Image (cartoon, grey):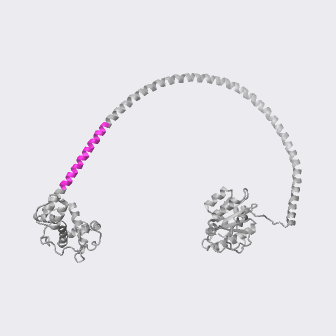
């Protein structure tokens, strides 16, 4: 039965011939599993439509479940209640009589519909309990067992037929395999005979080859004796040539010493001339009031940008500097590019971004004042709201433009520098490190610069 067929209010009265009590009647044997499942399904359907007052106390908790879930989870409780509670069983029987009146009438008259489902007949007989209902349930159980036995017999017959067919196939395959193996055996025997003939021919050729090898060995011994005599003559000629070569090398060395003596005088005159030119260049620069340096490639990149900058105070230099950073900064015309936020978020991420920038720039200003190196610090410009004009400082401060990241700006600065200029990039970003190495720049870990700026770390 489907839940849609269950009325919201079951009949107030059970049929007159449905007993209110079992009268001590019990089935002869346990219900067949199919009949029991059908009885539980009927009870589950009726349980959802009962009023609260009609619900058995043991089933009130599961009455709100969906019917299929109710039958699956509370099946044993529903079956036990139908067995012991005549009133609840009467309500379910009344629902069965309402849905299948012809079946219920036939059960009361002792006439079983020949085309009826045996499971439905057994469930209806168990619930309505007409005269002789135990025999009806037993007959249904026997019929179900006969159907199951017939089904098993059919399956066994099908399995036997399948096994026989497979046996016939295996026999046929066996015959074919034997025929194939016999054919292969004949072919192998023929092959063995051919191989024996070939082995005999090879042995004959091997014997002839051994004879030729003996003759060749004799010829080699004769040639070896002749070669030994020729080698002795060549070695004597080599010794004579080595003596001549040593004499020639002595003459060349004497000529080199004479040339170095003459070149030393030329080098001294060239150095004096070079010092005169340098002094003249310095005097011309002072006379014309020329600037001490020209614009660098990084200055040209910075000219087209209006990124924000913040002035920061200067601090003193640390006392304990890592050797690698010092050696890099001592190189002539060294340009140090710093990935700002990569360094600050490694060293002091707990500070606000503005304080991070100020702290790093302060330390870099002190480093630039001591080493005179060109230092450029690059930050992302997306988080800086108020653009401020950059003042005079030793560290060049750049912010990325809208739509551009600091990583892209650093790579652009690296590519702008001319080949051969010493260039170092301070970052821990793997993409920037790879790009810097491709362009010939030296990557420096952010932690190393932090230790250089703050020896107490």
State the residue at coordinates (56%, 23%): 209
Which quadrant of the figure has residue 132? bottom left
Asked whether residue 319 is in view, the answer is no
Considering depth in this image, is 37 or 117 the residue closer to the camera?
117
State the residue at coordinates (48%, 23%): 200
Q: Tell me if residue 291 comes above or below residue 265 in the rendering.
A: below
Q: Tell me if residue 407 comes above or below residue 217 in the rendering.
A: below
User: Horizontally, is 7 left or right of 223 in the view?
Assistant: left
Considering depth in this image, is 95 or 141 the residue closer to the camera?
95
Q: How many marks?
A: 0
Q: Is residue 40 magenta?
A: no
Asked whether residue 331 is in view, the answer is yes
Q: Is residue 171 magenta?
A: yes
Position in image of residue 238 (x %, y %) = 77, 32
User: Horizontally, is 163 left or right of 317 in the view?
Assistant: left
Position in image of residue 379 (x %, y %) = 65, 68
User: Horizontally, is 108 left or right of 323 in the view?
Assistant: left
Quarter of the image with the C terminus is: bottom right
Write down the region rendered in magenta. Answer: 145-172
State the residue at coordinates (24%, 47%): 158
Position in image of residue 134 (x %, y %) = 13, 63
State the residue at coordinates (24%, 68%): 5
Which quadrant of the figure has residue 92? bottom left
Query: What secondary structure do most residues of the magenta stretch adopt?
Result: helix
Considering depth in this image, is 286 or 446 the residue closer to the camera?
286
Position in image of residue 249 (x %, y %) = 82, 39
Q: Tell me if residue 1 comes above or below residue 254 in the rendering.
A: below
Quarter of the image with the N terminus is: bottom left
Which quadrant of the figure has residue 82? bottom left
């Amino acid at each position: 039965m489907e839940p849609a067929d269950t009325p919201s209010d079951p009949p107030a009265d059970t049929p007159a011939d449905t007993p209110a009590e079992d009268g001590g009647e019990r089935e002869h044997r346990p219900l067949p599993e199919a009949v029991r499942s059908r009885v539980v399904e009927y009870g589950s359907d009726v349980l959802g439509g009962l009023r609260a007052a009609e619900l058995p106390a043991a089933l009130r908790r599961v009455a709100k479940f969906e019917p299929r879930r109710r039958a699956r989870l509370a099946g044993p409780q529903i079956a036990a209640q139908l067995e012991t509670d005549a009133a609840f069983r009467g309500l379910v029987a009344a629902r069965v009589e309402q849905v299948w009146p012809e079946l219920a009438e036939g059960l009361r008259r002792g006439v079983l519909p020949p085309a009826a489902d045996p499971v439905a007949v057994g469930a209806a007989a168990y619930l309505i309990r007409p005269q002789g209902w135990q025999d009806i349930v037993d007959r249904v159980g026997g019929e179900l067992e006969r159907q199951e036995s017939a089904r098993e017999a059919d399956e066994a017959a099908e399995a036997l037929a399948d096994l026989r067919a497979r046996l016939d196939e295996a026999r046929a395959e066996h015959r074919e395999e034997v025929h194939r193996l016999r054919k292969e055996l004949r072919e192998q025997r023929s092959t063995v005979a051919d191989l024996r003939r070939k082995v005999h021919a090879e042995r004959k050729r091997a014997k002839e080859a051994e004879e030729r090898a003996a003759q060749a060995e004799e010829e080699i011994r004769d040639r070896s004796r002749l070669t030994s005599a020729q080698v002795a003559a060549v070695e004597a000629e080599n010794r004579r040539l080595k003596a001549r070569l040593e004499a020639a090398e002595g003459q060349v060395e004497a000529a080199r010493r004479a040339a170095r003596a003459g070149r030393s005088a030329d080098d001294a005159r060239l150095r004096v001339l070079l010092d005169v030119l340098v002094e003249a260049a310095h005097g011309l620069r002072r006379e014309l009031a020329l600037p001490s340096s020209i614009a660098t490639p990084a200055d040209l990149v910075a000219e087209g940008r209006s990124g924000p900058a913040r002035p920061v105070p200067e601090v003193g230099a640390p006392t304990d500097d890592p050797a690698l950073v010092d050696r890099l900064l001592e190189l002539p015309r060294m340009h140090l590019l710093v990935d700002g936020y990569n360094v600050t978020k490694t060293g002091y991420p707990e500070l606000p971004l503005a304080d991070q920038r100020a702290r790093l720039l302060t330390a870099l200003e002190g480093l630039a004042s001591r080493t005179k190196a060109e230092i450029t610090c690059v930050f992302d410009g997306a988080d800086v709201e108020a653009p401020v004009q950059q003042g005079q400082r030793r560290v060049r401060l750049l912010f990325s433009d809208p739509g551009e990241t600091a990583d892209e700006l650093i790579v652009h600065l690296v590519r702008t520098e001319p080949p051969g200029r010493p260039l170092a990039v301070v970052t821990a970003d793997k993409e920037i490190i790879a790009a810097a190495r491709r362009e010939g720049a030296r990557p420096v870990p952010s932690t190393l610069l932090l230790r250089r700026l703050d020896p107490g770390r």
